[in-house]
Image (spheres, rainbow, N blue to C red):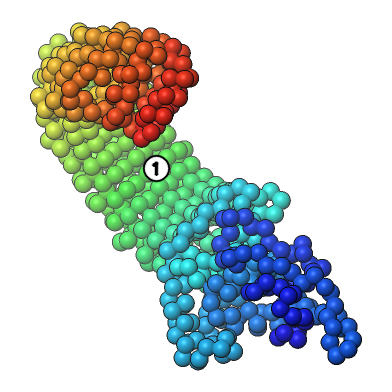
């Protein structure tokens, strides 16, 4: 070997150096500190002279790089360990390319002529290396310009001896030399332990690359493809046939993946647990039917969004979704009332626990009632942007779904306070959380004294951005929901002290989290009452934008709320005096404090903020124009544990 390399003596290179052809300096890698190949501990000088003196005459040096790739392949696959392979991969891109095309099992199948170690030592080391390579606990993520074939090759070579690659995520690609099928081929050769593969917006990777992964990465469990237009059914079928351990598949904006790929997944992957398909234009009823009918006893999570499927697919879900526990249906424009009615009456969704329907105009009162009856174990239900659901449908659904614990409605404008309070009173004894957001029909109606039974089980209530909801609704909520602990009324500009005080007074369990952000008409009277009656349980209070709350409310909080850890008084009328009252509280242990946009808080609050800051982890001083930069610098210096926004 020394003759082949033409070494001329000990001064030609530093100990442990690697020689390569001086004419090929451009082949050296420049992978940066994120590269996975193991670099030598220090730089090594290259041979400076192209000739050596031997036998009284000069002879031209001969580089190992004159050998063809086939010879280098045979040499490299006899290298004993991962550290040595990584060192070789650092020499040039050519060497890296050759090493990345050697399967891991080919290294262990050639234990001879590896070093001066004995055969037993070599065999033992190879067994240990193979065991480490099969672990697959390492994770690598490449984004944007860092996503190239060269880096993938370096990962393939470098991770094998350090636990094996188990998770690979590629987000975007280098526009000049981005990830291609060659990069995935290198991963398939060097990373047989791969279990998770995620490709986002990688247009240059096609079926060939996915087929390479399928050939050797048989342990693959999760496949995530987003915006991969070059991948078609062919690549997905290859994965399905070669990766029987596949449990989780996500396909988004893959324009060339259709029914055949999904049918193959259903037929060849007996362990499939989760499927998510979004905006894949070639996916139709045939693909959904083939997938669901083949995995009816194992598939637990189904998410279908923006597909051209019809009522047939909903009927298939209702009949074959025997193991489904989580179901999400979004933007299915071709499904009608009949599809949801058939799905509810299919009697196959007995195990369904969480159900979300969004932007599906086929949902009506009739279909909703059928779903409530057909899903006896449903615990969480979310309805978004379904414009044809009215009060009667909501009440009928809540009456039928006797196991319901969480109800969330957003932008369902035909729901009024009749439907809202009807759902609360008929929701059974298990309803724990109710959330309404941006429902324009939820306006105050004078009920008089309606005969509705209290909802003793409700613990969390959120009514956000419903401009018509005001004091009348709040007063009735105080009677209906005496066990509330978490309330969120953010953005309800119509409510005043007169409406909120009865709710505060009737909450028997003790409020824990209160969000009143944007309730511009609430005053210190409400804050004082809240602190007096619930100070012993309150942990988080948000008063952002309550411009009529001042120092008096802050003093009440300081004197009563011993458990409070999160306080937001941004854009309130507080001054330095209010901050001082917080600092003088005996048992207050705030962790998060926000006074953003409070123009009356100035540099005078520095001592008080320093005292409060002994327990703080986060402090927001943004848009406090009366606080100078020097004061902020002093706070940063003294409150080194606290994250300060200014």
The residue located at (84%, 74%) in the rendering is: 50
Q: Quadrant of residue 498?
A: top left
| Picture coordinates of residue 8, whole percent (x, y) | 77, 80
Side of 120 relative to 17 (left or right)? left
Please, is residue 632 above or below residue 599 in the view? below
| Picture coordinates of residue 569, whole percent (x, y) | 32, 18
| Picture coordinates of residue 22, whole percent (x, y) | 79, 69
In depth, the one of 71 and 630 nearer the eye is 630
Q: Quadrant of the N terminus?
A: bottom right
State whether residue 321 appears in this view.
Answer: no
In depth, the one of 407 and 199 nearer the eye is 199
In depth, the one of 360 and 505 nearer the eye is 505
The residue located at (63%, 74%) in the rendering is: 16
The residue located at (64%, 69%) in the rendering is: 89
Please, is residue 240 above or below residue 59 in the view? above
Q: Quadrant of residue 244?
A: bottom left
In depth, the one of 62 and 630 nearer the eye is 630
Task: From the image, tell me which residue sits under label 1.
Answer: 329
């Amino acid at each position: 070997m020394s003759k082949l390399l033409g070494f001329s003596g000990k001064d030609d290179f530093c100990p442990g150096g690697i020689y390569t052809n001086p004419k090929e300096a451009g082949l050296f890698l420049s992978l940066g500190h994120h590269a996975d190949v193991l670099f030598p501990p220090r730089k090594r000088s290259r041979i400076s002279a192209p000739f050596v003196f031997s036998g009284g005459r000069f002879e031209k040096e001969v580089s190992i790089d004159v050998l063809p790739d086939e010879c280098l392949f045979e040499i490299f696959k006899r290298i004993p360990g991962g550290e040595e392979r990584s060192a070789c991969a650092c020499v040039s891109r050519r060497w890296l390319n050759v090493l990345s095309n050697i399967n891991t099992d080919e290294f262990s199948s050639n234990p001879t002529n590896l070093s001066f170690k004995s055969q037993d030592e070599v065999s033992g080391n190879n067994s240990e290396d193979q065991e480490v390579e099969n672990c697959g606990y390492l994770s690598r993520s490449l984004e944007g310009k860092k996503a190239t074939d060269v880096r993938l090759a370096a990962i393939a070579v470098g991770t094998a001896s350090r636990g094996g690659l188990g998770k690979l995520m590629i987000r975007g690609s280098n526009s000049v030399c981005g990830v291609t099928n060659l990069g995935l081929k290198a991963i398939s050769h060097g990373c047989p332990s791969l279990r998770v593969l995620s490709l986002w917006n990688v247009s240059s990777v096609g079926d060939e690359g996915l087929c390479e992964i399928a050939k050797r990465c048989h342990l693959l469990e999760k496949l995530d493809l987003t915006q991969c237009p070059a991948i078609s059914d062919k690549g997905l079928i290859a994965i399905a046939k070669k990766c029987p351990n596949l449990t989780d598949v996500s396909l988004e904006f893959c324009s060339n993946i259709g029914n055949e790929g999904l049918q193959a997944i259903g037929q060849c992957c007996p362990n499939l647990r989760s499927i998510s398909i979004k905006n894949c234009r070639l996916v139709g009823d045939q693909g959904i039917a083939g997938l669901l009918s083949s995995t009816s006893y194992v598939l637990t999570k189904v998410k279908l969004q923006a597909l051209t499927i019809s009522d047939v697919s909903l009927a298939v879900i209702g009949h074959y979704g025997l193991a489904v526990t989580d179901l999400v249906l979004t933007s299915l424009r071709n499904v009608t009332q009949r599809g949801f009615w058939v799905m509810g009456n299919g009697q196959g969704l007995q195990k369904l626990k969480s159900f979300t329907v969004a932007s599906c105009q086929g949902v009506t009162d009739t279909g909703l009632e059928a779903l409530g009856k057909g899903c006896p174990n449903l615990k969480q239900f979310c309805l978004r942007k379904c414009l044809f659901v009215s009060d009667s449908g909501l009440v009928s659904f809540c009456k039928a779904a006797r196991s319901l614990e969480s109800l969330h409605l957003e932008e369902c404008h035909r729901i009024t306070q009749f439907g809202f309070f009807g759902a609360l009173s008929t929701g059974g004894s298990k309803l724990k959380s109710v959330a309404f957001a941006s429902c324009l029909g939820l306006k105050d109606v004078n009920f008089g004294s309606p005969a509705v039974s209290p909802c003793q089980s409700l613990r969390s209530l959120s009514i956000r951005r419903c401009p018509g909801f005001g004091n009348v609704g709040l007063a009735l909520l105080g009677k209906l929901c005496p066990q509330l602990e978490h309330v969120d009324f953010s953005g309800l500009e119509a409510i005043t002290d007169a409406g909120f005080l009865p709710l505060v007074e009737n909450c028997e369990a003790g409020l824990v989290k209160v969000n009143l952000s944007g309730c511009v008409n609430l005053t210190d009277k409400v804050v004082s009452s809240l602190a007096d009656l619930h100070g012993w349980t309150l942990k988080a209070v948000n008063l952002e934008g309550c411009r009529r709350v001042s120092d008096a409310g802050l003093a009440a909080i300081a004197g009563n709320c011993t458990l409070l850890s999160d306080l937001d008084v941004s854009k309130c009328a507080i001054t330095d005096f209010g901050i001082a009252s917080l600092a003088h509280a005996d048992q207050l242990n705030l962790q998060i404090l926000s006074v953003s946009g409070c123009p009356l808080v100035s540099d005078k609050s520095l001592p008080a903020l320093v005292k409060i800051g002994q327990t703080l982890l986060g402090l927001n001083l943004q848009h406090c124009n009366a606080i100078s930069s020097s004061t902020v610098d002093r706070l940063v210096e003294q409150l080194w544990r606290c994250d300060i926004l200014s």
